[in-house]
């Protein structure tokens, strides 16, 4: 993309000199502000801002190296299924799973969004996933319609897609569009996370090509052209001369030129070159500052990780490994959480991806850190993983950090807690919601089979949660098995043998009755007390044949008033009004983003500065819900 240039003719006082001055304009990510929800929103004045970002990637070695390195670190050793199994599939005839994931990560780092075209089989299930270059996509304000073009500079669009849905009976391809959050005036397209250093990246490009003196707009005069016998030339002729010279010799890669019209007779035109002093020193100073600005704009904690040598740094393996661990904790962990959530949403109901996914790490070096260094930079669970041991509760902390002492308590009035200065308030803000707005599934896609029960005691809460999970497993088990002429005791024994679930006959009978009332199974009991269980014919469809355990954001039973009151946090208001159910993985992702246990403390809590004890200070909680997908084939 070529930058636009203004040509200004500046008359000098008491002189007949004219100056050709070239001003560099940086493309801006301006959006249309007054466009209806069903119309495409242009991205940039020429609707081609992503092409400008691609040029920055191609022309700046520093920018390109940082984006490539970030992509490598985020990918690590790739995705694996939760449980550790490898993902050995092709997402389409030409792309392996890892190739596909790497393309999406690279787009996410370049543009802060990525796009995937999803195709479906005759049952409405996703069967193929095709990476769609992000620069080729434009969308509307509410992001439910997408326009694709190979080149937005020369034509409008080739294809129009609707937004991705997990079940699609129409048979047409849909587009999955995932974008990150970046505070800006834009409402549709997110700015790239490195937008603050774009000027420095452009400066780096200018330094590399060395085409403009003093970098684009602040450069010294390089040539004076004197026209003798030109004192009486009229202004129109002067302008034409300047235009001819500019068209032939200037432009983005040309020079700043002064044209001097004099009255001296009989002399031909004269050209003088003006060379700046000590240019090599200025080049070096600007280059160093630009490099530092780009590293800061990319949130890079150590240039060594990007392959950029620094004076006084040895760059040995221990130094690099330590730098990587810091970078992982401050940057990579959050990016992986965003992308893990995105890909698990993309592959929901997939016929080829059979479980939820998580990133795995790849060690930078085969050499090992000493024990003292390990304990300073690895969490307890990371140390256990290296030793081949399973993670433990409260293990996502450093070895020397105190174990959290979470206490469940009734929310207390702020006035009472504020009396004790040892308690510090932690509270999420409305803008924090934007970081997790992509998580969850819309409630209108599901029917509730059963709500979990509220409890007030921490130990009872854990027991109820385990009991609820058992009931969900039982629900899925009876859907997957056609049982006939069995007693409750015989069904109970089968559950113990096949699922390792202990349940009493009365609790089993209650669970079966609830599933029957929900229309999921048919339960028949003969006169001898023997039971036959069959999946309900209406429910036995691809989009309704699975029981899911998810969580609803609701008011705690001990809190007074409605679910939202005038003093409710802005974060909680947005989460309630978002009208979604959340998986446990979604809530764990929130915890990783916000740095505390969101499942326990929700929108906020009080923490004792001296003991790490906490007090619940949010009127809301996540309540378990057993769900089935709605039947969408009959309307």
Image (cartoon, helix red, strand yellow):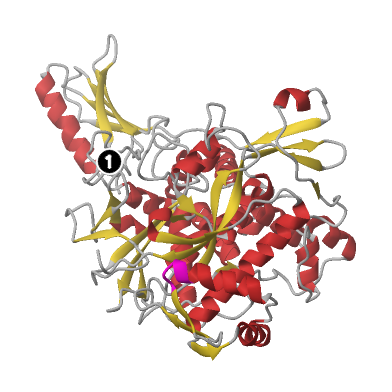
Q: Nearer the viewer, residue 250 or 387?
A: 387
Residue projecting furthest to the front: 527
Quarter residue 224 falls in: top left
- Tell me which segment is drawn in magenta: 516-520
The residue under label 1 is 251
The picture places residue 624, in percent across and down from the top left corner, at 58, 57
Camera-side residue of 405 and 466: 466
Residue 134, compared with residue 628, is above or below; it is above
Residue 119 placement: quadrant: bottom left
Q: Residue at 19% across / 17% down in the picture?
A: 263
Instruction: Inspect this view and state whether residue 315 appears.
Output: no
609 in the magenta segment: no
Closest to the observer: 210 or 180?
A: 180
Residue extending farthest to the bottom is 485
Where does residue 124 sit, x and y in percent of width and height? 31, 73
- From the top left corner, tell me how far across and down residue 553 is, in percent: 55, 47
Residue at x 89% of width, y 60% of height? 372
Q: Which residue corresponds to the image point at 68% horizontal and 65% vertical from the top-left?
A: 466
């Amino acid at each position: 993309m070529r930058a636009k240039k203004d040509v200004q003719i500046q008359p000098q006082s008491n002189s007949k000199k004219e100056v050709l001055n070239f001003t560099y304009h940086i493309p801006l990510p301006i959006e249309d502000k007054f466009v209806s929800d069903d119309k495409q929103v242009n991205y940039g004045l020429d609707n081609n801002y992503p092409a400008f970002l691609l040029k920055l990637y191609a022309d700046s070695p520093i920018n390109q190296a940082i984006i490539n390195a970030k992509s490598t670190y985020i990918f690590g050793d790739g995705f694996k299924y939760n449980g550790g199994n490898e993902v050995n599939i092709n997402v389409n005839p030409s792309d392996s799973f890892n190739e596909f994931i790497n393309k999406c990560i690279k787009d996410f780092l370049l543009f802060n969004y990525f796009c995937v075209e999803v195709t479906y089989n005759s049952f409405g299930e996703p069967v193929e996933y095709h990476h769609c270059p992000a620069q080729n996509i434009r969308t509307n304000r509410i992001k439910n319609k997408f326009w694709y073009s190979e080149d937005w500079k020369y034509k409008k669009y080739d294809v129009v897609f609707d937004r991705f849905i997990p079940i699609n009976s129409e048979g047409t391809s849909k587009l999955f569009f995932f974008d990150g959050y970046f505070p800006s005036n834009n409402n549709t397209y997110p700015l790239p996370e490195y937008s603050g250093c774009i000027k420095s990246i452009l400066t780096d490009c200018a330094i590399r090509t060395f085409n403009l003196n003093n970098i684009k707009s602040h450069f010294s005069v390089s040539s004076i052209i004197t026209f003798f016998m030109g004192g009486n030339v009229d202004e129109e002729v002067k302008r034409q001369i300047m235009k001819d010279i500019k068209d032939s010799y200037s432009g983005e890669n040309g020079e700043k030129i002064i044209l001097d019209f004099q009255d001296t007779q009989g002399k031909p035109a004269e050209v003088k070159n003006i060379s700046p002093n000590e240019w090599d020193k200025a080049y070096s100073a600007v280059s160093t500052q630009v490099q530092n600005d780009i590293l800061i704009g990319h949130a890079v904690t150590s240039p060594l990780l990007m392959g950029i040598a620094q004076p006084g740094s040895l760059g040995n393996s221990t130094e690099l490994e330590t730098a990587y661990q810091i970078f992982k904790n401050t940057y990579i962990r959050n990016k992986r959480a965003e992308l893990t959530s995105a890909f698990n949403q993309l592959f929901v109901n997939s016929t080829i991806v059979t479980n939820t996914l998580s990133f795995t790490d790849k060690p930078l070096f085969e050499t090992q850190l000493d024990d003292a260094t390990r304990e300073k930079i690895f969490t307890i669970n990371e140390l256990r993983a290296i030793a081949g041991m399973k993670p433990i509760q409260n293990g996502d902390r450093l070895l020397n950090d105190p174990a959290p002492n979470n206490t469940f308590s009734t929310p207390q009035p702020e006035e009472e807690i504020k009396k004790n200065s040892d308690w510090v308030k932690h509270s999420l803000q409305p803008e924090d919601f934007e970081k997790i707005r992509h998580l969850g599934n819309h409630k209108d896609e599901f029917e509730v089979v059963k709500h979990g029960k509220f409890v007030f005691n921490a130990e009872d809460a854990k027991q109820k949660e385990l009991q609820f999970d058992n009931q969900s497993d039982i629900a899925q088990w009876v859907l997957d098995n056609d049982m006939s002429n069995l007693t409750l005791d015989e069904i109970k024994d089968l559950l113990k043998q096949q699922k390792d679930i202990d349940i009493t006959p009365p609790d089993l009978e209650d669970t079966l009755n609830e599933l029957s009332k929900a229309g999921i199974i048919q339960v028949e009991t003969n006169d001898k007390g023997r039971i036959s269980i069959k999946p309900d014919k209406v429910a036995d469809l691809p989009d309704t044949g699975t029981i899911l355990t998810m969580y609803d954001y609701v008011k705690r039973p001990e809190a007074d008033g409605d679910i939202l009151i005038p003093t409710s946090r802005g974060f909680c208001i947005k989460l309630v009004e978002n009208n979604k159910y959340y998986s446990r993985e979604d809530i764990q992702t929130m915890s990783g983003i916000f740095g505390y246990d969101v499942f326990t403390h929700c929108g906020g809590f009080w923490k004792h500065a001296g003991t790490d004890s906490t007090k619940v200070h949010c009127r809301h909680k996540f309540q378990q819900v057993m769900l089935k997908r709605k039947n969408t084939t009959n309307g």
